[in-house]
Image (cartoon, helix red, strand yellow):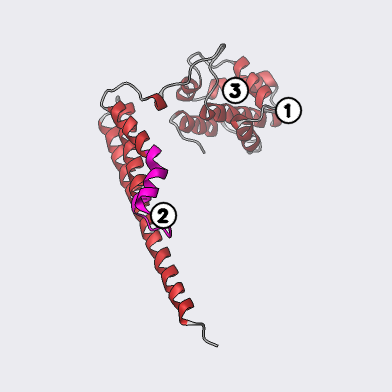
Amino acid sequence: MPRPRTNEAKDVLRDDYFELLQDALDTLWDDLAENSGHHADCLAQLPSNRSDCDLLAATGALQSVLRFLGFSPTKSLHLSERRKRFRIIEELRQALIDLLEGSAPAPMLRARKKRSGRRADVSSILTIKGIVAGLMQCQLRAGMTRPEAANWIVQNMSPKLAARISTKPVTLRMVEEWLDRFGGKHGEQNAARRAYKVWSQDSPTLTKQKFRRITERLGSGGIF
């Protein structure tokens, strides 16, 4: 028995909706790729001014996302309702533009007030410390002692990563502390612990070259 025409109409509308949505997503990815290319060009031309290149790229990426959110197909939201939902992203983009133009950071971009004691690590730095602790665990599993493994980590770590992690030189004691804090059965439950669990399962054959490549990428802002 053939289906009612109303169902056929709904199928057509559904197919049209998903086709439009796919087009909008493809456009978003194309825009982000173009923005990434501009970012690479900026870094090549102004290697000593990475912060401005990064800010410019961030504002471009946010603009692409905002364009997608404003004009991608939706089944129910009116434009006014959309703008309410992504207004904070617009405010973030404008705050970055103001920063790029030399204004003081907007309140949303200012560091939280420091409490007593050492400032807590942000999640990205915690993740890196967990990765390093996990890789140290791989070296322990390969047969190194704790001092040997900690020394191997310190000696072969990318200087760029060491500078990203700490304003002070990375020491054996620091690396062993990360292993104690984030490893074992009772490590702190945070981003570092999650990273440790993944990276401590890496191949026990961790060469100096492989470790250097990993830490070079982490030092450049990459997360695997």
Residue located farthest toward the bottom when viewing the structure as drawn: 1
Question: Is the C-beta separation of discs 1 and 3 under 8 Å?
Answer: no
Could you tell me how far apart the alpha carbons at marks 3 and 2 are, in whole angstroms? 56 Å
SS for dot 2 = loop
Check disc 1 and report the residue beneath it.
186
Query: Disc 3 designates what residue?
Result: 152
The three-letter code of the residue at mark 1 reads: His
| Residue drawn at 66 percent across, 32 percent down | 138
13 inside magenta stretch: no
Q: Say which label, 2 or 1, has the lower sequence index.
A: 2
Q: Earlier in the sequence, mark 1 or mark 3?
A: 3
Q: Nearest the camera: 140 or 128?
A: 128
Where is mark 2, residue-wise?
A: 77
**Quadrant location of the N terminus?**
bottom right
Disc 1 from disc 3: Cα separation: 25 Å
Q: Was residue 75 drawn as part of the magenta stretch in this picture?
A: yes
Residue that appears at 64% across and 19% down = 177
Q: Which residues are magenta?
A: 68-89
| 1 or 3: mark nearer the eye | 1
User: Which residue sits at x=57%, y=15%?
Assistant: 171
Which mark is on residue 133?
none
Q: Earlier in the sequence, mark 3 or mark 2?
A: 2
Dominant secondary structure (helix, strand or loop) of the stretch shown in magenta: helix
On the question of residue 88 being in view, the answer is: yes
Identify residue type, mark 3: Trp
